[in-house]
Amino acid sequence: MTLPKQVRLVEMSPRDGLQNEPGSLIATDIKTELINRLAHCGLSHIESASFVSPKWVPQMADAAEVMASIQRQPGVRYAALTPNMKGFENALAAGVDEVAVFAAASESFSLKNINCSIADSLRRFQPVMEAAQEHNIPVRGYVSTVLGCPYEGDIAPQQVAYVASELANMGCHEISLGDTIGTGTPLKAKRMLEAVNTQVPTERLAAHFHDTYGQAIANLFAVLEEGIGVIDASVAGLGGCPYARGASGNVATEDVLYLLEGLGIHTGVNLEPLIATGEWISQQLERPNGSKAGQALAVPSGAANGQEV
Ligand code: HMG
Ligand code: MG
């Protein structure tokens, strides 16, 4: 078994974590404080916002204000989703360091999520890729529903490989493979990765696993064994996808970090302030902390509340 010596964690909570939060709109200053706290934990890549239609995803409507209010730390990459040119132009004006386009391996999910077919989505990304290149902005690509679709069920690994290779060929520096509804299991994850690897090298892939069925940590271990070195995660396990009913949050960053520390894998992220951040945001949102490690290691009630960053 060969495991990577180090892993880059890509923090999802300000975007994937908050985009689906039910109830009233989350205040901009809570979002910016979350991002600032995450940067202080040592996270070097934070997906901070989403420049999508506010009618589709109201919680991300203040993306520009969020980007304008964060205290930028050197060495931290503040990224955002941009599904089309309008999103890219707004993200550029807001000063994001990296943008991401997002496609799906399932036609039905593509239609529900971004209102177009897979082929149309790839065509729509082309001008975004060109504009990003012109402005020297790296582009990440997502493939959703890589281990199952809420509308179509099982997805053929070859279909995932096809969409991943299209994104890689159009210039995405990294392809993040999303188990959007968390139905994957370790062997399925390995088989999917094997298929993708025939088209895109492991060094350009990231694992983006939601934890709906409690399989995300097992699935991550499985793909770490295959050499995956980039993992997307969300503090306190926040989140879900508005277009995938029942999908819960990303795997919790605290749980992933606890796993990686146990395996002796370096990340540059500090567990203690991360636990405090997970507690803090859970209290702000008045929801239980979705991280097992977070629950086990949290300081007794209230103490995380007044923590300065
Ligand atoms: P559409 O309705 O087909 O687009 O939406 P349109 O071009 O016809 O425009 C319709 C209206 O939206 C117009 O406004 C546009 O100006 C506006 P109106 O004239 O009606 O007032 N509009 C925009 N406004 C702001 N920013 C924009 C933008 N684009 C159009 N960028 C669109 C197409 C893609 C925009 C829409 O479907 C959308 O915004 N979808 C959001 C999907 C989304 O954010 N999903 C969640 C993120 S993906 C995810 O969570 C999965 C992931 O985590 C991986 C995984 O877990 O699998 C990444
Ligand atoms: Mg996601």
Image (cartoon, rainbow, N blue to C red):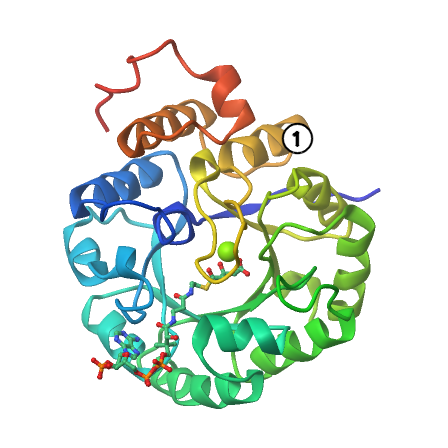
Residue drawn 44% across the image and 34% down it: 236
Q: Quadrant of residue 163?
A: bottom right
For label 1, the residue is: 264
Is 125 above or below relative to 158? below
Residue drawn 49% across the image and 72% down it: 112
Q: Is mark 1 on a helix, strand or loop?
A: loop
Q: Which amino acid does label 1 sit on?
A: Gly
Is 39 above or below relative to 259? below
Left/right of residue 12 with respect to residue 71 in the rendered view = right
Q: Can residue 207 be seen in this view?
A: yes
Quarter of the picture containing the N terminus is top right
Q: Quadrant of residue 165?
A: bottom right
Give the image location of residue 226, x and y in percent: 77, 52
Give the image location of residue 286, x and y in percent: 31, 29
Q: Is residue 198 visible?
A: no
Is 131 above or below relative to 82? below
Is 107 above or below relative to 48? below
